[in-house]
């Protein structure tokens, strides 16, 4: 695997004028090394756990636990109808205590606090550990756990993530490799989007031969406390937590446009409405999507007045609301 490009001394201008427009992932070394949380993590696992516990307001947090036979891999269940781990809402202090206790013996379960809303659970953390590249209204999300692996998946939004404690290995693939990654089911997926069926840390190329093509484009990096990574939207990323205590904070932003309609919802709608049509119909709809949506070889607005408010050009707020209501009502109708 090639290494993800590494940047140092990144400021706001560099991030928004050079890194984000490139459309490529980037590792930013020591970007958040001045965070108090990172300094606690560099002192000891006990120090970072105590620091987080002191900021905890007692709100239960979404926690998952994978049994020993999962070998640290958070994944689908054997029948692909669910997941191979248990879910619970428990106090953060309890999770932090379990992480420290597990260090003293043989690790049996892989634990992970998923998508902790920092402003709701650790409000002082956000005050004391501010990010410096994005707007202040972009909320932080925290991930805490011991050793474990998350299969490659994609985010609809752009992602800026900082390793606070422990080490994490990131393995990334561009969106064009989707078919070579053998995505699993959408419904019941561990994180709400399909994940790769391939174990990227121990791939079975007999079962998944096309994965070799994905490996040719794979990018990899290991991040330590204070390091950050930028992951463009729709890039597949698998993440391995490598230490007994790992903490990551990330920020999602942008990616769904001014109308606030998720392209991932559109994809799911397309699977319901187009994917099972016959080949002739699918090809016809592709022509319409290429013309109206993807617009690589044409501009569907060039023959229309520039000040026209319409879906094809730019709908005004009232039109956008009307279309959303129309779609919502149609989706509610029984076949």
Image (cartoon, grey):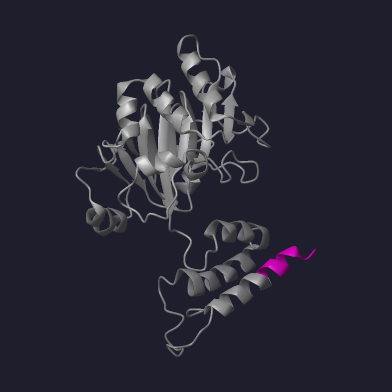
| Boundaries of the magenta span | 327-335
Task: Classify 63 as above or below 326.
Answer: above
**Closer-to-camera residue (84/199):** 84
Return the x and y of residue 165 as percentages of the image width and height.
Answer: 37, 29
Residue visible at 30% across and 22% down? 43
Residue sticking out furthest to the left: 9
Return the x and y of residue 29 as percentages of the image width and height.
Answer: 25, 38
Q: Is 65 in the magenta? A: no
Considering the whole magenta stretch, tell me its main secondary structure.
helix
Task: Classify 177 as above or below 44.
Answer: below
Residue visible at 49% across and 74% down? 291
Return the x and y of residue 95 as percentages of the image width and height.
Answer: 53, 25
Residue sticking out furthest to the top: 105
Return the x and y of residue 225 as percentages of the image width and height.
Answer: 31, 31
Is 101 left, or right, of 275 in this rendering? left
Residue sticking out furthest to the bottom: 305
Residue visible at 66% across and 69% down? 327
Q: Is 330 in the magenta? A: yes
Task: Classify 293 as above or below 254.
Answer: below
Residue visible at 63% across and 76% down? 322
């Amino acid at each position: 695997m090639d290494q993800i490009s590494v940047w140092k001394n990144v400021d706001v201008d560099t991030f928004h004028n050079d890194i984000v427009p490139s459309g490529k992932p980037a590792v930013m070394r020591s970007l958040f090394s001045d965070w108090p949380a990172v300094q606690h993590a560099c002192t000891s696992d006990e120090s970072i756990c105590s620091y987080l516990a002191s900021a905890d307001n007692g709100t239960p947090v979404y926690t998952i636990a994978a049994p020993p036979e999962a070998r640290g891999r958070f994944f689908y269940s054997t029948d692909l109808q669910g997941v191979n781990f248990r879910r619970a809402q428990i106090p953060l202090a309890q999770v932090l205590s379990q992480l420290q206790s597990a260090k003293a013996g043989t690790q049996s379960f892989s634990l992970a606090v998923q998508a902790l809303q920092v402003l709701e659970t650790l409000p002082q953390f956000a005050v004391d550990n501010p990010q410096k590249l994005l707007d202040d209204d972009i909320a932080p999300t925290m991930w805490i756990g011991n050793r474990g692996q998350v299969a490659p998946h994609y985010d609809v939004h752009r992602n800026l993530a900082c390793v606070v404690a422990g080490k994490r290995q990131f393995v990334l693939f561009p969106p064009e490799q989707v078919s070579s990654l053998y995505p699993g089911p959408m419904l019941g997926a561990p994180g709400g989007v399909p994940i790769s069926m391939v174990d990227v840390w121990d791939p079975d190329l007999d079962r998944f031969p096309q994965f070799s093509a994905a490996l040719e484009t794979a990018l990899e990096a290991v991040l330590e406390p204070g390091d950050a990574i930028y992951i463009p939207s729709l890039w597949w990323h698998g993440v391995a937590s490598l230490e007994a205590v790992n903490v990551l904070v990330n920020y999602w932003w942008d990616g769904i446009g001014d109308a606030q309609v998720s392209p991932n919802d559109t994809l799911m709608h397309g699977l319901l409405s187009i994917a099972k049509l016959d080949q002739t119909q699918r090809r016809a709809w592709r022509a319409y999507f290429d013309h109206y949506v993807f617009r690589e070889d044409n501009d569907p607005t060039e023959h229309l007045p520039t000040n026209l408010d319409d879906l094809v050009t730019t709908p005004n707020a009232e039109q956008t609301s009307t279309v959303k209501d129309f779609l919502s009502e149609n989706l509610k109708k029984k076949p």
